[in-house]
Amino acid sequence: MRIATSTNLISYNRDSTKTEMIHLLPLYAKEGMRVLDLNFCEMLNPESVLRTEGYRPYIERLSKLKMTHSLIFNQAHAPYASDRMALAKDQGDELDQLLTRSIGFCKELAIPILVVHPIKGSIEENVAYYRPFVELSKKAGVSLAFENLNEKDEIHEANELCTLVEAFNSRHVGICYDFGHAHMRGHDIRKDILTLKDHLIATHVADNHGERDEHLLPFYGTIDWKRALQALRKIGYDGDLTYECMFFNQHLPLKLKVPAIRQAKLIGDYLLTL
């Protein structure tokens, strides 16, 4: 296992603005965080160049930074809506276009896994909605990883995720386990992991106190990380532990955010010893 981080690790600012990932990659590399999850949720910003036909220079810049700083892009996160099926048709079509574009970006940047959110609805509705995207990702050499969510009317149970993945009967479909979401739902994380087994291909590592999706670094909340790591080792998980911890440092001045990356790396290194 390796420690990785979403590019949103220090992207949130005091005034609620977000720094684009293209400006953060050199900082992550300098502090030893070279395995990165590219947060294509940037495209949810109406002003993001990634939404436009002028995205090419941005993607080329990401590719150059990858080479310059010896980075590994282990996964990416697709844009999503909390309730895709409740969107107006034009909004839904636009979201579908962003998902299609994300798959294309993964192909161009040699990103093997794209994390997606199940839509609100049944397993059957998810299979019907995502089947074209699974076919598209297969052609691109990309695997879609369905994430466990955290609301009652969303897919969050480990067995539901397994049923969803198995319905596609494709090696290009797997599961991204979000520890924070599971903890909020009161799940037995060890039991979840043992249920997911070989379907588990990616993770979102974040802590909380069991009530809100706080996106804290490990040990800042109440998740039993030793028990979680032992379960991962038991199933032979050889993927990455990828941080999605963007709120623990949001209100820090920029000068203190760089040491925050260093702290995240130290905590990750310790996590791997458990």
Image (cartoon, helix red, strand yellow):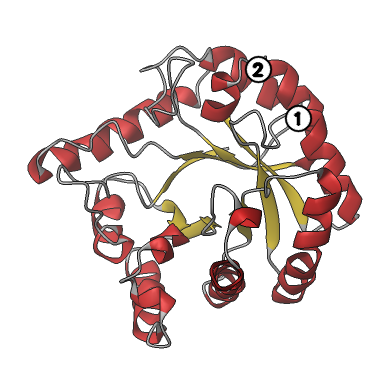
User: Foreground residue, 245 or 64?
Assistant: 245
Tell me which corner region of the image, top left, top right, bottom left or bottom right, holds residue 150.
Answer: top right
Frontmost residue, 39 versus 86: 86
Question: In the picture provided, is 233 more to the left or to the right than 179?
Answer: right
Could you say where residue 230 lies in the image, as x and y percent from the top left? 64, 18
Residue contact between numbered discs 1 and 2, judged by CB atoms under 8 Å: yes
In this rendering, position of residue 242 left or right of residue 159: left
Residue 182 % position (x, y): 60, 25
- Considering depth in this image, is 4 or 119 the residue closer to the camera? 119
Task: Establish if 21 lies above or below 240.
Answer: below
Label 1: which residue?
158
Query: Which labelled disc corresponds to residue 187?
Result: 2
Specify the amino acid type for callout 2.
His
Left or right, 176 with respect to 183, comes to right
Among the two numbered marks 1 and 2 on one chain, the one whose residue lies closer to the N terminus: 1
Residue 28: x and y, percent?
A: 29, 51
Could you classify mark 2 by the number of other residues whose Cα lies within 10 Å: few (under 14), some (14-19), or many (20 or more)?
some
Q: Residues within 10 Å of mark 1 (few under 14, many from 20)?
A: many
* Residue at left offset 55%, top offset 14%: 226
Q: Position of residue 213 (x, y in %)?
A: 44, 29
* Secondary element type, mark 1: helix
Instruction: Name the residue: 82% across, 30% down.
Output: 159
